[in-house]
Image: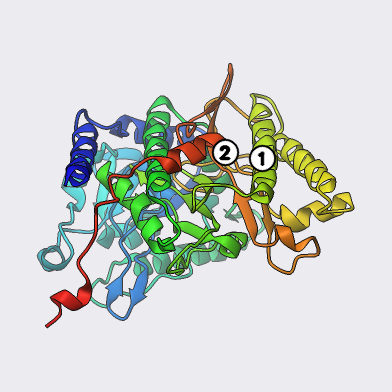
Amino acid sequence: MFRLFFFFLFLSAISLQSQSEAPPALDISFHKERRQMVLDKLPPNSISVIFSAPIRNRSNDVDHPYHQNPNFYYLTGFQEAHAVLVLLGTPTEIGDSSSQEILFVRDRDPYYALWEGGIKGPEATQREFGIDKVLSTTRFSSFLSSLQGINTIYHFPPFNDVRDHPRNAFDLFALQAAFTGFIFEQNELSKPEDSTVTTDQEVLPAIIGSLREIKTEQEIAILKQAVAMSAIGQIEVMRAIHPEISERELQGIHEFVFKKYGAKHVGYPSIVGAGAHGCVLHYTANTSDMVGNQLVLMDVGAEFQNYTADVTRTIPANGKFTKEQAEIYNLVLAAQNAGIEASVVGASFSDPHRVARSVIQQGLTELGIIQSTEEVRTYFPHGTSHYIGLDVHDPGTYGPLQANSVITVEPGIYIPPNSPCDPKWWGIAIRIEDDILITPSGPVNLSAAAPREIDKIEKMIAQDSPLDEFVLPVLDSVID
Protein backbone atom coordinates (compact mmCIF):
# COMPACT_ATOMS: atom_id res chain seq x y z
CA MET A 1 0.00 0.00 0.00
CA PHE A 2 2.89 2.34 0.79
CA ARG A 3 4.35 1.87 -2.70
CA LEU A 4 0.91 2.24 -4.27
CA PHE A 5 0.62 5.59 -2.52
CA PHE A 6 3.86 6.70 -4.16
CA PHE A 7 2.58 5.52 -7.55
CA PHE A 8 -0.38 7.88 -7.32
CA LEU A 9 1.86 10.58 -5.89
CA PHE A 10 4.04 10.14 -9.01
CA LEU A 11 1.03 10.56 -11.30
CA SER A 12 -0.12 13.64 -9.39
CA ALA A 13 3.35 15.18 -9.55
CA ILE A 14 3.49 14.75 -13.32
CA SER A 15 0.01 16.21 -13.67
CA LEU A 16 0.79 19.22 -11.48
CA GLN A 17 4.13 19.83 -13.18
CA SER A 18 2.60 19.63 -16.63
CA GLN A 19 -0.08 22.17 -15.65
CA SER A 20 2.12 24.54 -13.62
CA GLU A 21 2.69 27.02 -16.42
CA ALA A 22 1.53 27.62 -19.95
CA PRO A 23 3.52 25.47 -22.38
CA PRO A 24 5.42 27.16 -25.20
CA ALA A 25 3.46 27.54 -28.43
CA LEU A 26 3.76 29.21 -31.81
CA ASP A 27 1.73 32.37 -32.31
CA ILE A 28 0.23 33.75 -35.52
CA SER A 29 3.20 36.07 -36.03
CA PHE A 30 5.47 33.05 -36.48
CA HIS A 31 3.41 31.68 -39.37
CA LYS A 32 2.98 35.17 -40.85
CA GLU A 33 6.75 35.67 -40.87
CA ARG A 34 7.30 32.27 -42.50
CA ARG A 35 4.83 33.11 -45.27
CA GLN A 36 6.54 36.43 -45.87
CA MET A 37 9.93 34.72 -46.08
CA VAL A 38 8.57 32.46 -48.80
CA LEU A 39 6.91 35.39 -50.60
CA ASP A 40 10.21 37.29 -50.57
CA LYS A 41 11.76 34.48 -52.62
CA LEU A 42 8.99 34.22 -55.22
CA PRO A 43 9.46 35.92 -58.61
CA PRO A 44 6.75 38.21 -60.02
CA ASN A 45 3.79 36.56 -61.73
CA SER A 46 4.30 33.27 -59.92
CA ILE A 47 1.93 31.16 -57.87
CA SER A 48 2.80 28.70 -55.10
CA VAL A 49 0.23 26.18 -53.91
CA ILE A 50 0.44 24.09 -50.73
CA PHE A 51 -2.32 21.62 -49.82
CA SER A 52 -3.35 20.36 -46.41
CA ALA A 53 -2.73 16.67 -45.73
CA PRO A 54 -5.21 14.01 -46.81
CA ILE A 55 -7.37 12.17 -44.31
CA ARG A 56 -5.81 8.71 -44.18
CA ASN A 57 -8.02 5.64 -43.93
CA ARG A 58 -7.30 2.99 -41.30
CA SER A 59 -9.90 0.43 -42.32
CA ASN A 60 -13.41 0.40 -43.76
CA ASP A 61 -15.12 3.58 -42.46
CA VAL A 62 -12.54 4.35 -39.75
CA ASP A 63 -9.83 6.94 -40.40
CA HIS A 64 -6.53 7.56 -38.67
CA PRO A 65 -6.38 10.62 -36.37
CA TYR A 66 -5.75 13.59 -38.62
CA HIS A 67 -2.18 14.85 -38.91
CA GLN A 68 -1.60 18.07 -40.80
CA ASN A 69 0.92 18.44 -43.61
CA PRO A 70 3.93 19.93 -41.75
CA ASN A 71 4.72 22.40 -44.54
CA PHE A 72 1.13 23.61 -44.59
CA TYR A 73 1.11 23.93 -40.79
CA TYR A 74 4.47 25.76 -40.86
CA LEU A 75 3.01 28.48 -43.07
CA THR A 76 -0.48 28.71 -41.57
CA GLY A 77 -0.84 27.09 -38.13
CA PHE A 78 -4.13 25.71 -39.46
CA GLN A 79 -4.94 22.14 -38.42
CA GLU A 80 -8.05 21.29 -40.47
CA ALA A 81 -8.28 19.07 -43.55
CA HIS A 82 -9.47 19.97 -47.07
CA ALA A 83 -7.66 23.30 -47.29
CA VAL A 84 -5.17 24.94 -49.62
CA LEU A 85 -2.80 27.91 -49.27
CA VAL A 86 -1.95 30.07 -52.28
CA LEU A 87 1.02 32.46 -52.29
CA LEU A 88 1.38 34.88 -55.19
CA GLY A 89 4.58 36.54 -56.39
CA THR A 90 2.55 39.57 -57.50
CA PRO A 91 -0.36 41.04 -55.49
CA THR A 92 -3.71 40.15 -57.05
CA GLU A 93 -7.05 41.90 -56.73
CA ILE A 94 -9.49 39.84 -54.69
CA GLY A 95 -12.74 41.57 -53.92
CA ASP A 96 -12.07 45.09 -52.73
CA SER A 97 -8.34 44.66 -52.01
CA SER A 98 -5.20 43.01 -53.32
CA SER A 99 -3.32 40.24 -51.61
CA GLN A 100 -0.45 37.80 -52.02
CA GLU A 101 -1.75 35.15 -49.59
CA ILE A 102 -5.08 33.34 -49.74
CA LEU A 103 -6.17 30.41 -47.64
CA PHE A 104 -9.12 28.35 -48.86
CA VAL A 105 -10.98 26.43 -46.13
CA ARG A 106 -14.24 24.53 -45.78
CA ASP A 107 -17.47 26.26 -44.91
CA ARG A 108 -19.02 25.34 -41.58
CA ASP A 109 -20.99 22.09 -41.67
CA PRO A 110 -23.36 21.16 -38.80
CA TYR A 111 -23.60 17.54 -39.98
CA TYR A 112 -19.82 17.13 -39.95
CA ALA A 113 -19.60 18.87 -36.58
CA LEU A 114 -22.01 16.31 -35.10
CA TRP A 115 -19.80 13.37 -36.06
CA GLU A 116 -16.26 14.72 -36.28
CA GLY A 117 -16.12 18.12 -34.63
CA GLY A 118 -16.49 21.75 -35.58
CA ILE A 119 -15.16 23.46 -38.69
CA LYS A 120 -14.04 27.05 -38.20
CA GLY A 121 -15.14 28.36 -41.59
CA PRO A 122 -13.56 31.27 -43.51
CA GLU A 123 -14.54 34.17 -41.23
CA ALA A 124 -13.39 32.62 -37.95
CA THR A 125 -10.22 31.33 -39.60
CA GLN A 126 -9.31 34.79 -40.87
CA ARG A 127 -9.82 36.29 -37.42
CA GLU A 128 -7.85 33.58 -35.61
CA PHE A 129 -4.91 33.02 -37.98
CA GLY A 130 -4.24 36.49 -39.34
CA ILE A 131 -4.08 35.48 -43.00
CA ASP A 132 -4.81 38.32 -45.46
CA LYS A 133 -7.58 36.51 -47.31
CA VAL A 134 -9.50 33.42 -46.24
CA LEU A 135 -12.07 32.16 -48.72
CA SER A 136 -14.35 29.18 -49.02
CA THR A 137 -13.01 26.19 -50.93
CA THR A 138 -16.08 26.59 -53.15
CA ARG A 139 -14.25 29.54 -54.73
CA PHE A 140 -10.90 27.86 -55.38
CA SER A 141 -11.59 26.73 -58.94
CA SER A 142 -13.03 30.08 -60.05
CA PHE A 143 -10.12 31.89 -58.37
CA LEU A 144 -7.63 29.90 -60.42
CA SER A 145 -9.58 30.61 -63.60
CA SER A 146 -9.45 34.33 -62.87
CA LEU A 147 -5.67 34.53 -62.62
CA GLN A 148 -3.92 36.39 -65.43
CA GLY A 149 -0.28 36.55 -66.45
CA ILE A 150 1.00 33.61 -64.41
CA ASN A 151 4.30 32.36 -65.82
CA THR A 152 5.64 30.18 -62.97
CA ILE A 153 3.78 27.58 -60.91
CA TYR A 154 5.43 26.17 -57.80
CA HIS A 155 4.03 23.24 -55.85
CA PHE A 156 4.94 20.05 -54.01
CA PRO A 157 4.44 16.67 -55.66
CA PRO A 158 0.71 15.90 -55.33
CA PHE A 159 -0.49 13.51 -52.63
CA ASN A 160 -1.18 10.12 -54.19
CA ASP A 161 -3.52 8.82 -51.47
CA VAL A 162 -6.34 11.38 -51.63
CA ARG A 163 -9.84 9.91 -51.48
CA ASP A 164 -12.96 11.43 -53.00
CA HIS A 165 -15.41 12.20 -50.18
CA PRO A 166 -18.90 11.90 -51.68
CA ARG A 167 -20.51 14.32 -49.21
CA ASN A 168 -18.01 17.08 -49.95
CA ALA A 169 -17.90 18.40 -53.48
CA PHE A 170 -15.02 20.70 -52.51
CA ASP A 171 -12.79 18.25 -50.66
CA LEU A 172 -9.04 17.81 -51.12
CA PHE A 173 -9.69 15.46 -54.04
CA ALA A 174 -11.61 18.23 -55.84
CA LEU A 175 -9.07 20.90 -54.88
CA GLN A 176 -6.18 18.89 -56.31
CA ALA A 177 -8.20 18.11 -59.43
CA ALA A 178 -8.92 21.82 -59.93
CA PHE A 179 -5.23 22.65 -59.55
CA THR A 180 -4.22 19.90 -61.99
CA GLY A 181 -6.69 21.35 -64.48
CA PHE A 182 -5.26 24.83 -63.93
CA ILE A 183 -1.73 23.57 -64.69
CA PHE A 184 -2.97 21.87 -67.85
CA GLU A 185 -4.78 25.02 -69.01
CA GLN A 186 -1.74 27.22 -68.36
CA ASN A 187 0.49 24.85 -70.30
CA GLU A 188 -1.98 24.86 -73.19
CA LEU A 189 -2.04 28.67 -73.17
CA SER A 190 1.75 28.83 -73.18
CA LYS A 191 2.28 26.85 -76.36
CA PRO A 192 3.14 29.91 -78.48
CA GLU A 193 6.88 30.50 -78.35
CA ASP A 194 6.50 34.02 -76.96
CA SER A 195 4.58 32.85 -73.87
CA THR A 196 5.79 30.06 -71.61
CA VAL A 197 4.63 28.78 -68.22
CA THR A 198 7.08 26.88 -66.04
CA THR A 199 5.83 24.27 -63.56
CA ASP A 200 8.28 23.35 -60.81
CA GLN A 201 8.04 20.79 -57.96
CA GLU A 202 11.52 21.41 -56.49
CA VAL A 203 11.88 25.13 -55.77
CA LEU A 204 9.10 25.41 -53.18
CA PRO A 205 10.21 22.35 -51.15
CA ALA A 206 13.77 23.73 -51.20
CA ILE A 207 12.69 27.19 -50.02
CA ILE A 208 10.56 25.89 -47.16
CA GLY A 209 13.09 23.18 -46.27
CA SER A 210 15.87 25.75 -45.86
CA LEU A 211 13.62 27.79 -43.57
CA ARG A 212 12.61 24.78 -41.47
CA GLU A 213 16.27 23.83 -40.96
CA ILE A 214 16.89 26.85 -38.70
CA LYS A 215 14.64 26.92 -35.66
CA THR A 216 13.38 30.07 -34.00
CA GLU A 217 13.45 30.61 -30.25
CA GLN A 218 9.80 29.53 -30.08
CA GLU A 219 10.47 26.34 -32.00
CA ILE A 220 13.46 25.44 -29.85
CA ALA A 221 11.40 25.94 -26.68
CA ILE A 222 8.75 23.54 -28.01
CA LEU A 223 11.35 21.00 -29.10
CA LYS A 224 12.96 21.12 -25.66
CA GLN A 225 9.60 20.19 -24.15
CA ALA A 226 9.14 17.26 -26.54
CA VAL A 227 12.69 16.02 -25.90
CA ALA A 228 12.35 16.36 -22.12
CA MET A 229 9.17 14.26 -22.18
CA SER A 230 10.97 11.63 -24.21
CA ALA A 231 13.96 11.57 -21.85
CA ILE A 232 11.68 11.14 -18.84
CA GLY A 233 9.88 8.34 -20.66
CA GLN A 234 13.22 6.56 -21.03
CA ILE A 235 13.98 7.06 -17.34
CA GLU A 236 10.63 5.68 -16.20
CA VAL A 237 11.04 2.65 -18.46
CA MET A 238 14.48 2.00 -16.99
CA ARG A 239 12.93 1.98 -13.53
CA ALA A 240 10.05 -0.26 -14.60
CA ILE A 241 11.76 -2.80 -16.86
CA HIS A 242 12.16 -6.47 -15.91
CA PRO A 243 12.56 -9.68 -17.93
CA GLU A 244 8.87 -10.63 -17.73
CA ILE A 245 7.58 -7.36 -19.21
CA SER A 246 6.41 -7.21 -22.85
CA GLU A 247 7.58 -4.92 -25.63
CA ARG A 248 4.12 -3.35 -25.91
CA GLU A 249 4.03 -2.63 -22.16
CA LEU A 250 7.32 -0.76 -22.48
CA GLN A 251 5.87 1.14 -25.43
CA GLY A 252 2.83 1.94 -23.32
CA ILE A 253 4.91 3.35 -20.46
CA HIS A 254 6.74 5.69 -22.82
CA GLU A 255 3.54 6.91 -24.42
CA PHE A 256 1.74 7.19 -21.07
CA VAL A 257 4.42 9.58 -19.84
CA PHE A 258 4.12 11.64 -23.03
CA LYS A 259 0.37 12.00 -22.63
CA LYS A 260 0.66 12.91 -18.95
CA TYR A 261 2.81 15.82 -20.05
CA GLY A 262 0.31 16.90 -22.71
CA ALA A 263 1.71 15.35 -25.87
CA LYS A 264 -1.18 14.32 -28.11
CA HIS A 265 0.81 11.98 -30.32
CA VAL A 266 4.09 10.19 -30.79
CA GLY A 267 6.32 11.65 -33.47
CA TYR A 268 6.58 8.30 -35.28
CA PRO A 269 5.63 4.67 -34.58
CA SER A 270 7.41 3.61 -31.39
CA ILE A 271 10.25 1.10 -31.76
CA VAL A 272 10.71 -1.29 -28.83
CA GLY A 273 12.86 -4.24 -29.88
CA ALA A 274 14.21 -6.90 -27.53
CA GLY A 275 17.22 -8.96 -28.58
CA ALA A 276 17.34 -9.66 -32.31
CA HIS A 277 14.25 -7.48 -32.84
CA GLY A 278 16.56 -4.53 -32.24
CA CYS A 279 18.49 -5.52 -35.36
CA VAL A 280 15.45 -4.51 -37.45
CA LEU A 281 16.03 -0.77 -37.80
CA HIS A 282 12.37 0.22 -38.05
CA TYR A 283 10.87 -2.58 -35.99
CA THR A 284 7.45 -1.29 -34.84
CA ALA A 285 5.51 -4.52 -34.30
CA ASN A 286 6.49 -4.61 -30.60
CA THR A 287 4.86 -8.03 -30.23
CA SER A 288 7.14 -9.94 -27.83
CA ASP A 289 5.16 -11.00 -24.76
CA MET A 290 8.31 -11.18 -22.66
CA VAL A 291 11.62 -9.40 -23.31
CA GLY A 292 13.61 -11.90 -21.22
CA ASN A 293 17.27 -11.41 -20.27
CA GLN A 294 18.01 -9.41 -23.41
CA LEU A 295 18.94 -5.92 -24.40
CA VAL A 296 15.95 -3.78 -25.34
CA LEU A 297 16.37 -1.04 -27.93
CA MET A 298 13.78 1.72 -27.54
CA ASP A 299 13.51 4.46 -30.17
CA VAL A 300 10.58 6.58 -29.04
CA GLY A 301 9.76 10.28 -29.35
CA ALA A 302 6.96 12.51 -28.12
CA GLU A 303 5.28 14.92 -30.49
CA PHE A 304 4.41 18.17 -28.73
CA GLN A 305 2.76 21.15 -30.43
CA ASN A 306 3.48 19.38 -33.75
CA TYR A 307 7.24 19.13 -33.08
CA THR A 308 8.81 15.74 -32.44
CA ALA A 309 11.71 14.44 -30.41
CA ASP A 310 13.73 11.37 -31.42
CA VAL A 311 15.50 9.62 -28.52
CA THR A 312 16.89 6.07 -28.34
CA ARG A 313 18.26 4.11 -25.42
CA THR A 314 19.32 0.47 -25.25
CA ILE A 315 19.16 -1.20 -21.84
CA PRO A 316 19.43 -4.70 -20.32
CA ALA A 317 16.04 -6.00 -19.17
CA ASN A 318 17.60 -7.85 -16.22
CA GLY A 319 19.51 -4.77 -15.06
CA LYS A 320 23.05 -5.83 -15.95
CA PHE A 321 25.05 -5.71 -19.19
CA THR A 322 27.00 -8.85 -20.05
CA LYS A 323 30.68 -8.51 -20.92
CA GLU A 324 29.95 -8.74 -24.66
CA GLN A 325 27.00 -6.38 -24.47
CA ALA A 326 29.08 -3.85 -22.53
CA GLU A 327 31.91 -3.98 -25.07
CA ILE A 328 29.58 -3.22 -27.96
CA TYR A 329 27.64 -0.64 -25.94
CA ASN A 330 30.75 1.31 -24.95
CA LEU A 331 31.92 1.25 -28.55
CA VAL A 332 28.63 2.81 -29.71
CA LEU A 333 28.79 5.33 -26.86
CA ALA A 334 32.33 6.35 -27.81
CA ALA A 335 31.20 6.77 -31.42
CA GLN A 336 28.25 8.88 -30.32
CA ASN A 337 30.39 11.10 -28.10
CA ALA A 338 32.74 11.67 -31.04
CA GLY A 339 29.77 12.47 -33.28
CA ILE A 340 28.35 14.96 -30.79
CA GLU A 341 31.73 16.69 -30.43
CA ALA A 342 31.83 17.06 -34.22
CA SER A 343 28.40 18.74 -34.29
CA VAL A 344 29.60 22.32 -34.45
CA VAL A 345 28.66 25.36 -36.50
CA GLY A 346 30.28 25.22 -39.93
CA ALA A 347 31.08 21.52 -39.86
CA SER A 348 29.93 19.40 -42.77
CA PHE A 349 26.63 17.67 -42.09
CA SER A 350 28.44 14.40 -42.69
CA ASP A 351 31.14 15.04 -40.08
CA PRO A 352 29.28 13.44 -37.12
CA HIS A 353 28.75 10.31 -39.20
CA ARG A 354 32.31 10.28 -40.50
CA VAL A 355 33.87 10.35 -37.03
CA ALA A 356 31.31 7.96 -35.51
CA ARG A 357 31.86 5.45 -38.29
CA SER A 358 35.62 5.70 -37.83
CA VAL A 359 35.32 4.87 -34.13
CA ILE A 360 33.02 1.91 -34.81
CA GLN A 361 35.18 0.66 -37.65
CA GLN A 362 38.28 0.62 -35.46
CA GLY A 363 36.42 -0.93 -32.52
CA LEU A 364 34.83 -3.74 -34.53
CA THR A 365 38.21 -4.52 -36.04
CA GLU A 366 39.85 -4.72 -32.61
CA LEU A 367 37.07 -7.02 -31.38
CA GLY A 368 37.61 -9.30 -34.39
CA ILE A 369 34.05 -8.80 -35.66
CA ILE A 370 35.23 -7.36 -39.00
CA GLN A 371 38.43 -7.86 -40.94
CA SER A 372 38.16 -5.06 -43.53
CA THR A 373 36.97 -1.45 -43.44
CA GLU A 374 34.25 -2.16 -45.99
CA GLU A 375 32.57 -4.59 -43.58
CA VAL A 376 31.64 -1.85 -41.10
CA ARG A 377 28.48 -1.12 -43.04
CA THR A 378 27.30 -4.68 -42.39
CA TYR A 379 26.86 -3.82 -38.71
CA PHE A 380 26.38 -0.03 -38.94
CA PRO A 381 24.13 0.32 -42.00
CA HIS A 382 22.56 3.76 -41.49
CA GLY A 383 23.57 7.39 -41.22
CA THR A 384 24.31 9.10 -37.93
CA SER A 385 22.33 12.32 -38.18
CA HIS A 386 19.19 13.97 -39.51
CA TYR A 387 17.29 17.13 -38.67
CA ILE A 388 14.27 17.01 -36.37
CA GLY A 389 11.39 19.44 -36.09
CA LEU A 390 7.87 19.20 -37.46
CA ASP A 391 8.98 15.89 -38.98
CA VAL A 392 11.15 13.33 -37.27
CA HIS A 393 13.25 13.45 -40.45
CA ASP A 394 12.93 17.18 -41.00
CA PRO A 395 13.86 18.81 -44.30
CA GLY A 396 16.90 21.02 -44.61
CA THR A 397 19.84 21.80 -46.84
CA TYR A 398 22.09 19.08 -45.37
CA GLY A 399 24.91 21.54 -45.93
CA PRO A 400 27.29 22.90 -43.27
CA LEU A 401 25.76 22.79 -39.78
CA GLN A 402 24.12 26.07 -38.78
CA ALA A 403 23.32 27.56 -35.40
CA ASN A 404 19.81 26.85 -34.10
CA SER A 405 19.33 23.71 -36.12
CA VAL A 406 18.58 20.51 -34.19
CA ILE A 407 19.97 17.18 -35.34
CA THR A 408 20.19 13.65 -34.04
CA VAL A 409 23.42 11.82 -33.37
CA GLU A 410 22.57 8.11 -33.41
CA PRO A 411 25.26 5.57 -34.23
CA GLY A 412 24.39 1.91 -33.81
CA ILE A 413 25.74 -1.61 -34.09
CA TYR A 414 23.42 -4.47 -35.03
CA ILE A 415 24.60 -8.09 -35.07
CA PRO A 416 21.76 -10.40 -36.12
CA PRO A 417 21.89 -14.14 -35.40
CA ASN A 418 23.97 -16.09 -37.92
CA SER A 419 26.18 -13.10 -38.70
CA PRO A 420 29.69 -13.96 -39.99
CA CYS A 421 31.34 -13.42 -36.61
CA ASP A 422 31.76 -15.22 -33.28
CA PRO A 423 28.30 -16.37 -32.07
CA LYS A 424 28.90 -14.69 -28.71
CA TRP A 425 28.03 -11.40 -30.42
CA TRP A 426 24.85 -12.64 -32.08
CA GLY A 427 21.61 -10.89 -31.18
CA ILE A 428 23.28 -7.75 -29.82
CA ALA A 429 21.63 -4.59 -31.16
CA ILE A 430 22.54 -1.20 -29.72
CA ARG A 431 21.62 2.31 -30.78
CA ILE A 432 22.10 5.44 -28.69
CA GLU A 433 20.38 8.53 -30.02
CA ASP A 434 20.24 12.07 -28.70
CA ASP A 435 18.85 15.34 -29.98
CA ILE A 436 21.55 17.95 -30.38
CA LEU A 437 21.02 21.71 -30.61
CA ILE A 438 23.73 23.36 -32.69
CA THR A 439 24.87 26.63 -31.07
CA PRO A 440 27.75 29.08 -31.66
CA SER A 441 29.32 27.89 -28.41
CA GLY A 442 29.08 24.19 -29.21
CA PRO A 443 26.59 21.30 -29.28
CA VAL A 444 23.94 21.03 -26.56
CA ASN A 445 22.52 17.59 -25.80
CA LEU A 446 18.82 18.25 -25.20
CA SER A 447 18.14 14.64 -24.15
CA ALA A 448 21.09 14.26 -21.75
CA ALA A 449 18.72 13.66 -18.81
CA ALA A 450 18.19 10.08 -19.99
CA PRO A 451 21.26 8.11 -18.77
CA ARG A 452 23.69 6.91 -21.43
CA GLU A 453 26.61 5.48 -19.45
CA ILE A 454 26.42 1.83 -18.37
CA ASP A 455 26.84 2.49 -14.65
CA LYS A 456 24.14 5.15 -14.66
CA ILE A 457 21.74 2.96 -16.63
CA GLU A 458 22.24 0.03 -14.26
CA LYS A 459 21.74 2.28 -11.23
CA MET A 460 18.52 3.64 -12.74
CA ILE A 461 17.21 0.14 -13.49
CA ALA A 462 17.90 -0.83 -9.86
CA GLN A 463 15.57 1.91 -8.61
CA ASP A 464 11.99 1.15 -7.61
CA SER A 465 9.32 2.16 -10.07
CA PRO A 466 5.98 3.71 -9.13
CA LEU A 467 4.52 1.24 -11.61
CA ASP A 468 5.68 -1.80 -9.61
CA GLU A 469 2.39 -1.90 -7.68
CA PHE A 470 0.21 -1.28 -10.70
CA VAL A 471 -1.22 -4.78 -11.08
CA LEU A 472 -4.39 -5.35 -13.05
CA PRO A 473 -6.93 -8.04 -12.15
CA VAL A 474 -6.84 -11.36 -14.01
CA LEU A 475 -9.24 -11.07 -16.94
CA ASP A 476 -11.00 -14.34 -16.12
CA SER A 477 -12.03 -12.86 -12.78
CA VAL A 478 -14.04 -10.08 -14.45
CA ILE A 479 -15.51 -12.10 -17.33
CA ASP A 480 -18.94 -13.62 -16.71
Contact check, label 1 and label 2, Cβ < 8 Å? yes
Camera sees residue 148: no
Q: Which residue is mark 2?
A: 454
Q: Residue at x 61, y 43 (%)?
A: 410
Q: Is residue 132 left or right of residue 2?
A: right
Q: Residue at x 86, y 53 (%)?
A: 374
Q: Residue furthest top?
A: 441
**Res 99 → quadrant:** top left
Q: Residue at x 25, y 71 (%)?
A: 168
User: 342 or 119, which is in the foreground?
Assistant: 342
Q: Position of residue 243 (x, y in %)?
A: 45, 59
Q: How is the image coloured?
A: rainbow
Q: Position of residue 403 (x, y in %)?
A: 56, 24
The span from disc 1 to disc 2 (Cα, nearest Å) is: 8 Å
In primary-sequence order, the first of circles 1 and 2 is 1
Q: Position of residue 67 (x, y in %)?
A: 35, 56
Q: Is residue 288 left or right of residue 117?
A: right
Image vertical order of residue 122 relative to residue 14, above or below: below
Q: Residue furthest right?
A: 372
Q: Residue at x 64, y 38 (%)?
A: 333
* Amino acid at dot 1: Asn
Q: Which residue is mark 1?
A: 330
* Amino acid at dot 2: Ile
User: 44 or 87, which is in the foreground?
Assistant: 87
**Res 421 → quadrant:** bottom right
